[in-house]
Amino acid sequence: MSTPTGQPRLSARAGVTVSVPAKLNVGLAVGPRRPDGFHSIDTIFCALDLYDRVTAEPAERLSLAIDGPEAATVPADEGNLAWQAAELLAGLAGRRPAVALRIDKRIPVAAGLAGGSADAAGALLCCDRLWQLATPPPRLAELASRLGSDVSFALTGGLARGSGRGERLVELAGPPLHWVLAAATGELATAAVYAELDRQRPTAAEPMLPDELIEAVRAGDPARVAPLLHNDLQPAALALAPYLAQTLAAGLAGGALAALVSGSGPTCAFLAGDAEHARELASKVSTAEHCRFAIATVGGVPGPSRHRT
């Protein structure tokens, strides 16, 4: 059976699976701390072809199971944003959050790649479809912003300029760029990195990325993008995790066009010229000290894709 728009109507017995991509901040300018405790930012979000799969199935009560190499490090209760997303959507729909959620976790954990935000976005989409709520996209985006600053972009994917806390998005169009992600040992708490930034920089102007970076990303020209890459959080991340400087240096020595800490870290991102260059660079960076593993990836991929189970 189909709806008038031609979309398949899922029965109450059917499950829903959504693949949601990780994200990279191609540029990140951070403003002063706001009265609400957050920082205003100006950033370019870039969705990567590195996915978590979120599945929702009918159940008597809310539950969450997590699979994947780092599953043991991820909370499977109300501490998980996916759990919170199901509760939030159910509460607004006036129903119990009766759903069994399962996450196949492939995005590195606590890596500055918004894996938790991706899972929250996936849970919103899966539960909305499973419960046949047909929540309008602007309403889903508003719910996403309640859950976290990166969740709104996780709903859309692709390329977008983010402002506010990151929840205000303007879509950007551009060819794909190739990256290598080096997942570092250890963890960096986002709140701690922002606190260190405030300590290092007691005053700050309103954030503004250079127009040249926006245009270079739109053009998909790695040679133009490379010298413009910048992350205001990088000095704070390096102060808390000095070993990241070795990872950045290893990537540059291996031939990366540019290197930066991804978001609040501890993952480092390296810009490559093309897919072959990215594969070669990943092989070199993977042997660096403090590197858990390195992945060649493509940026600017579409947002969440749904599957029927």
Image: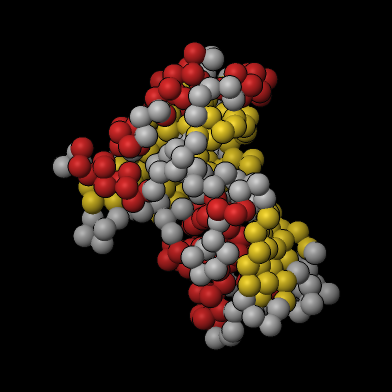
25 and 108: which is toward the camera: 108
Q: Which residue is drawn at 51% across and 70% down?
A: 78
Would residue 284 be found to the left or right of residue 81 on screen? right
The outermost residue toward the left is 203
Q: Residue at x 67, y 50 (%)?
A: 68
Would residue 297 be found to the left or right of residue 203 on screen? right
Asked if one can make out residue 23 in the rendered structure from this viewpoint, the answer is: yes
Query: Residue 42 sits in which quadrant?
Result: top left
Would residue 207 be found to the left or right of residue 120 on screen? left
Which image quarter is the C terminus in? bottom right
126 and 2: which is toward the camera: 126
The x, y position of residue 127, in whole percent, is: 64, 71
Asked if one can make out residue 140 in the rendered structure from this viewpoint, the answer is: no
Which image quarter is the N terminus in? bottom right
The x, y position of residue 221, in whole percent, is: 53, 23
Q: Residue at x 49, y 57 (%)?
A: 152
Q: Which residue is drawn at 67% across and 20% down?
A: 276
